[in-house]
Amino acid sequence: RHSLARKLATSAAVMSFWGAKVAPGATAEADTSAGQLLHLSQACLDPAAASGASSKVLVEQNGTSFAIAVLKEGGQECCALDLFIDLKEAKLKVEGKAAVHLTGYFESDDMDEDKDEDEAPAKAKASPKVEAKSSPKAEVK
């Protein structure tokens, strides 16, 4: 139980909200420290978008652009995403006629390593209990 509380406290400490309103033709700006990844959660058209306006959200990495959302006023105005992006290596940009609101959060890129370290001792502790339970069953047969 203490380990779970520690994980939750650690997760809360290293995760922080991020949001940006990106104009057409612009790139999202964000100050990141080393070892932080952006978890991009959602892209939505600006509520003030003109009727029928559309925009694309692109990730540009190593000189190549990848469309991750195509949004249109009166149609699909929001897109849920689940992308982890290192903004030191990639850029988020918007093309089209409307601004786009991008939201997500930053987290440390070593969070998975922390989870693995915490889970390994728990598995080791559980193994002897399983062995102890199997011994009496073998005698009952």
Image (cartoon, rainbow, N blue to C red):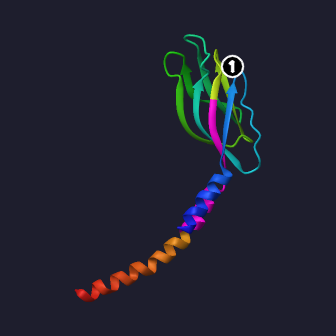
In front here: 45 or 27? 45
Relative side of 127 to 2, left or right? left
Whether residue 110 is in magenta: the answer is: yes
Relative side of 45 to 35, left or right? left
Q: Vertically, is 121 above or below 64?
A: below
- The part of the image, by quadrant, that contains residue 60 is top right
Q: Vertically, is 121 above or below 41?
A: below
Is label 1 in a helix, a strand or a loop? loop
Q: Residue at x 75, y 42 (%)?
A: 88
**Position in image of residue 28 (x %, y %):** 71, 30
Q: Vertically, is 50 above or below 25?
A: above
Q: Which residues are magenta?
A: 102-119
In front here: 110 or 58? 110
Which residue extends farthest left?
141
**Position in image of residue 14 (x %, y %):** 68, 52
Which residue extends farthest bottom?
139
In front here: 77 or 37? 77
Whether residue 109 is visible here, answered yes or no, is no
- The part of the image, by quadrant, that contains residue 4 is bottom right
Relative side of 39 to 34, left or right? left
Whether residue 69 is visible here, answered yes or no, is yes
Q: Residue at x 55, y 11 (%)?
A: 52
Quadrant housing the C terminus: bottom left
Whether residue 130 is in magenta: the answer is: no
Q: Residue at x 28, y 83 (%)?
A: 137
**Position in image of residue 135 (x %, y %):** 34, 86
**Which residue in the structure is indicated by mark 1?**
24
**Position in image of residue 70 (x %, y %):** 55, 24
Which residue type carries mark 1? Pro
How many numbered discs, if any? 1
Near mark 1 (Cα within 10 A), the count class, few <14, some 14-19 or many ≥20, is some
Q: Residue at x 62, y 54 (%)?
A: 11
